[in-house]
């Protein structure tokens, strides 16, 4: 490995700036990856704006990026896997650099039939959506509502739910333009929220029962509509408020995770229930900022 490398930094103004910095040596449990491809996440853009001193924001400088793929060039003590030379994809702060320092647990092997360009953007989406399904207590054979399903990670959520044998997947989009896309990736029912009432459409699609699990990517009134009935489901709520793996200099990102600690007994909503009556029994929320 060379002694120095080029890396991108934020917090210096409205644009990223390049710098020559030392290539880090891996400490215990860490690896260094030669980055062959990196992916731009929405969080990268919002963090740049949040740190821009020209706009009166933090002005705290940080090495940019999260998502990357490449081959391992060095491993620290206690790292059995991955090995030097292995192709990996991962997400960790500071990935927009020629060499990425990462905890070895933050990477996955790149499947043989995937190139770096395909692999680079997968881990964050896979971890977010699979993790949300796990938090929500999803089990094969259950029904899932995925709001904001045409978002980058929503599309992954639909495909994971399909791969994990969801009984029924209902996906939302605001307009009909992406209906076919959602069908192609695995949605059974597509709800066009600018034309259809979400609560009514979900109840119609589920014979009045509502869904077992909701993955909400929208927030606001949509999230409220997805909550279980208050009388039967004491939801616990925690605001994660973080981008995928924030550096210590980061400012809060508008995300949150909410999950039901248990699946309450089925309590079908009446056909004409209002949004506050709820259409899901368990869920995870990853809020899309801004009103519906
Ligand atoms: N990307 C990630 O790695 C990541 C990780 C964790 C959490 N999240 C969270 O997941 C959500 C989606 O992120 P993303 O990066 O995947 O988004 P994205 O790719 O930019 O997609 C946003 C989609 O949401 C829909 N949308 C936009 N504004 C909306 C509004 N006001 N009301 C309802 N729907 C709206 C649009 O779909 P239609 O035009 O089809 O309606 C749009 O395609 C965000 O809340 C984000 O914070 C993302």
Image (cartoon, rainbow, N blue to C red):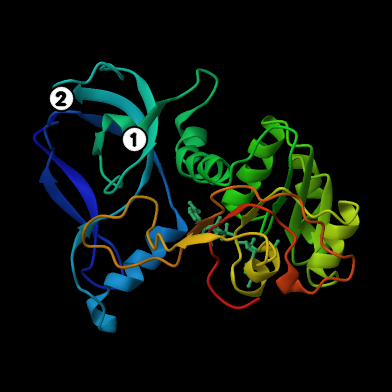
**Percent x, y for residue 216?**
62, 58
- The image quarter containing residue 77 is top left
Q: How many marks?
A: 2
**Percent x, y for residue 262?**
58, 47
Element marked by disc 2: loop
Residue visible at 46% across and 44% down in the picture: 124
Q: Nearer the viewer, residue 135 or 85?
A: 135
Q: Nearer the viewer, residue 235 or 17?
A: 235
Q: Which residue is mark 2?
A: 76
Task: Name the residue at the bottom extreme.
Answer: 56
* Rendered-image quarter of ligand 1: bottom right
Q: Which residue is mark 1?
A: 106
Which quarter of the image is occupied by the N terminus? top left
**Percent x, y for residue 141?**
75, 34
Residue visible at 52% across and 45% down in the picture: 135
Disc on the earlier residue, 2 or 1: 2
- Residue 282 visible somewhere in the drawing: yes
Q: Is residue 102 left or right of residue 279?
A: left
Residues marked 2 and 1 touching at CB (< 8 Å): no
Element marked by disc 1: helix
Q: Nearer the viewer, residue 54 or 158?
A: 158
Disc 2 crowd rating (10 Å Cα; few below 14, some 14-19, many 20+) is some
Q: Is residue 117 left or right of residue 267?
A: left
Which quarter of the image is occupied by the C terminus? bottom right
């Amino acid at each position: 490995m060379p002694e120095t490398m080029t890396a991108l930094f934020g917090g210096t103004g409205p644009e990223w700036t390049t710098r020559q910095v030392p290539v880090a040596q891996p400490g215990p449990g860490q690896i260094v990856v030669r980055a062959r491809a990196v992916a731009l996440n929405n969080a990268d853009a919002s963090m740049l704006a949040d740190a821009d001193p020209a706009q009166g924001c933090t002005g705290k400088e940080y090495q940019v990026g999260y998502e990357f793929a490449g081959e391992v060039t060095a491993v620290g003590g206690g790292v059995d896997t991955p090995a030097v030379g292995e192709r990996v994809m991962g997400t960790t702060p500071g990935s927009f650099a020629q060499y990425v320092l990462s905890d070895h647990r933050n990477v996955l092997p790149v499947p043989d039939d995937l190139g770096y360009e395909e692999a680079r953007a997968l881990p964050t989406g896979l971890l977010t959506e699979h993790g949300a399904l796990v938090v929500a207590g999803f089990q094969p054979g259950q029904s899932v509502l995925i709001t904001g399903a045409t978002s980058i990670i929503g599309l992954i959520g639909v495909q994971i739910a399909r791969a994990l044998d969801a009984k029924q997947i209902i996906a939302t989009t605001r307009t009909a333009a992406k209906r076919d896309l959602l069908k192609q990736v695995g949605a059974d029912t597509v709800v066009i929220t600018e034309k259809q009432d979400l609560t009514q459409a979900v109840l119609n699609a589920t014979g009045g029962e509502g869904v077992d699990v909701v993955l909400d990517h929208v927030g606001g009134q949509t999230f409220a509509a997805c909550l279980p009935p208050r009388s039967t489901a004491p939801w616990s709520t925690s605001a994660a408020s973080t981008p995928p793996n924030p550096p210590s200099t980061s400012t809060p990102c508008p995300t949150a995770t909410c999950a039901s600690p248990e699946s309450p007994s089925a309590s079908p909503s009446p056909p004409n229930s209002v949004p506050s009556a709820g259409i899901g029994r368990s869920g995870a929320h990853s809020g899309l900022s801004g009103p519906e």
